[in-house]
Image (spheres, coloured by chain):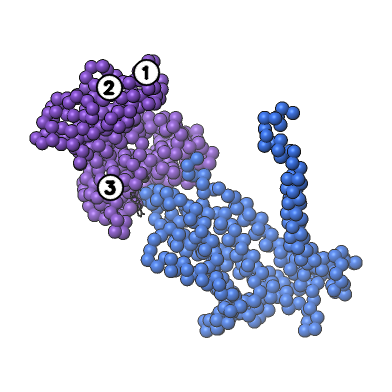
Chain colours: A purple, B blue
Amino acid sequence: MANLALRNLTKAYGKTEVLHGINLDIQDGEFIVFVGPSGCGKSTTLRMIAGLEEITSGQIIIDERVVNNLEPKERDIAMVFQNYAIYPHMSVKKNIAFGLRSSRLSKPEKEARISEVAEILNMTSLLERKPSQLSGGQRQRVAIGRAMVRDPAVFLFDEPLSNLDAQLRTQMRLEIKKLHHRVGNTIVFVTHDQVEAMTMADRIVIMKDGHIQQIGTPADVYHRPANTFVAQFIGAPSMNMLPATLNGHQLQLASAKPIEIGLNADTRREVIVGVRPDDLILSSGEPLVAGKVTVREPLGPETLIYVETPGGEIIAKADGRTPPEVGEHVELGADLENLHIFDAKTGVVMS
Amino acid sequence: MTVLDIHPTTSAVLADPPVRRQRNMGQFLRWLLLFAGGIAMVMPIVYMISTSLKWPHEVYNINLVPDEPTLENYLYVLEDGRFYGWFWNSLLIATLTTVSNLFFDSLVGYTLCKFRFPGRQLVFIAILSTLMIPTEMLVIPWYLMSQSFGWLDSYWGIMFPGMMTAFGTFLMKQFFESVPDDFIEAARIDGLNEFQIWWTVAMPLVKPALAALAIFVFLGNWTAFLWPLVVTNSVEMYTIPVGLSGFGDEVDVAWELIMTGAAISTIPTLVVFLIFQRFIIRGVVMAGLKG
Ligand SMILES: Nc1ncnc2c1ncn2[C@@H]1O[C@H](COP(=O)(O)OP(=O)(O)OP(=O)(O)O)[C@@H](O)[C@H]1O
Ligand SMILES: [Mg+2]
């Protein structure tokens, strides 16, 4: 059916380049999520795929066909916008039917398609309503419905959930994922919420300042971040970053005993040791870091503790029932395999 | 009362009558001003109707209620065949001009608002700057133009200067700003061409503006006097205002007949207003966006 490839894609507004060569291969039926901080170029990339934004250089290929110069309607894509963009002057049914305007289906076929989509989205009883009579979540479903009726090669979503409240967002997240399992079209989904990215994606594309930082499955980017940016962007609370030096196999953290690791540096190097709050263990054995608890944040099953250490403040997770007191001195250790060592200068992971 | 004890702000207001009195005073002044304004607006209409019910000898009396009210004037105007022709001319001209303005003003306004092209700003400023030229100054060039094109004393001659207006273009451009680009892009993805997008997506979203523009343009043309007077020669081509001004003879102006014609001619403007005002409902645009 539909695979999508981006080759050396760049975008410049006037003289300022905002995308600097994006390369990406998306397989048929894959659910790809673009994630990154505001202004990193996610929407721009998506809009270029849709044909709403001109391509400065590079190629976009849908199904072995270079679509650079095709109109949006000729690209066989559908897009769902952050603001839904469903037409307020048309009923739900008309809105959904709008997606079929340019299709060659016969009238009964169109009708059948619309009711099928309404069924999938659980909206059959709402078809005659106007958008103003719908809740936020229902409006978003109409927008998805309008995209779905066309059965496009690629679905594009630009932050479709960010206007919904937290609970609804979680619910819609699940619904979109189920929908994907059911219809199986290729999806490119943009969000700045890393939880959305982790929970929905087959593969995540992490972007920053117009560059791709890493492409990988949620497990990949979580467990094997390619650089400090990805390491800190993915996962909440964020990964702790501790300055250290690596000399041969000796890893020296501020005010702790050197530890022997598998990595080897020929000469003494400045590195950054990343360790997730979840991977820190309250221990009295071989501590990695030690310090005083300054703040506790009880979350129920666990408690976040903020610990003042010589290398800076770090966050750890402690048991929810018997967390250390504020002011208490704690020692924190971690399994060596859970340490991420990054080059201090480039931020790139060392392996 | 305990309520006053826990709500110090409330008790402060209640314990301070001058503040309240001042507020009432302000309310009263505002009301008075509006009332005076309302009277000033209504008086001419009241006098128009009152005069239309008077006999000629009473016209110059300032009294509001005629001594001997009469419908004679109405009968005269309606029996005088010319009035129907003028009415028809006015109706035709005002209607066609309104339709033309709704179409062209919004088309140009939309283009200026939603498309980026070199010289866009320049075009917009050029259109706006024509707003500063008064009709009186334009009448002579229009006349010369009509003359050389052979449009004098024709419908087209009366209509052409107003078929599109800078004001309408400006109004529509401003209103299209409120139509989110997402709607337009969504329609583009759905496969509509730019004209279809304008017509099926953008236009329905600015209905209130279209209604307002329709009322403006219709009234403006219905009451237009100077240009129709200049461009028409034959009585059959007159519009209502031009025709009415000719009631009477060289010495006497027949005010009671003019007022009668004016009173009759307000009826279509009321109809237009009643038709279009129901479209002036706010908030249509926002309903399709985030809740
Ligand atoms: N029309 C434009 N003209 C100039 N610069 C633009 C334009 N549109 C976007 N940009 C710039 O391009 C960069 C990428 O923007 P983009 O909208 O793709 O970011 P994003 O990743 O979607 O961010 P967000 O999460 O805030 O939506 C930004 O720095 C932005 O300022
Ligand atoms: Mg964006």
Amino acid found under the numbered disc labelled 2: Leu
Q: Earlier in the sequence, mark 1 or mark 2?
A: 1
Q: Confirm or reject: label 3 Cβ below 8 Å from ligand 1.
A: yes
Tag 1 residue: A323
Q: Quadrant of the N terminus of chain B?
A: top right
**Element at label 1:** loop
- Using the image, tell me which numbered label, if any, was put on residue B289: none
Residue shown at 87%/67% (left/top)?
B63
Residue B225 versus residue B100: which sits nearer the camera?
A: B225
Ligand 1 within 8 Å, label 2 CB = no
Q: What residue would you read off at disc 3?
A: A210
Residue ID for mark 2: A332
Q: Position of residue B48 (x, y in %)?
A: 78, 67
- Say which label, 2 or 3, has the lower sequence index: 3
Give the class, few, some or many, for how many residues have Cα within 10 Å of label 2's Cα (few <14, many ≥20): some
Q: Local crowd at mark 3 within 10 Å, few (<14), some, or many (≥20)?
A: many
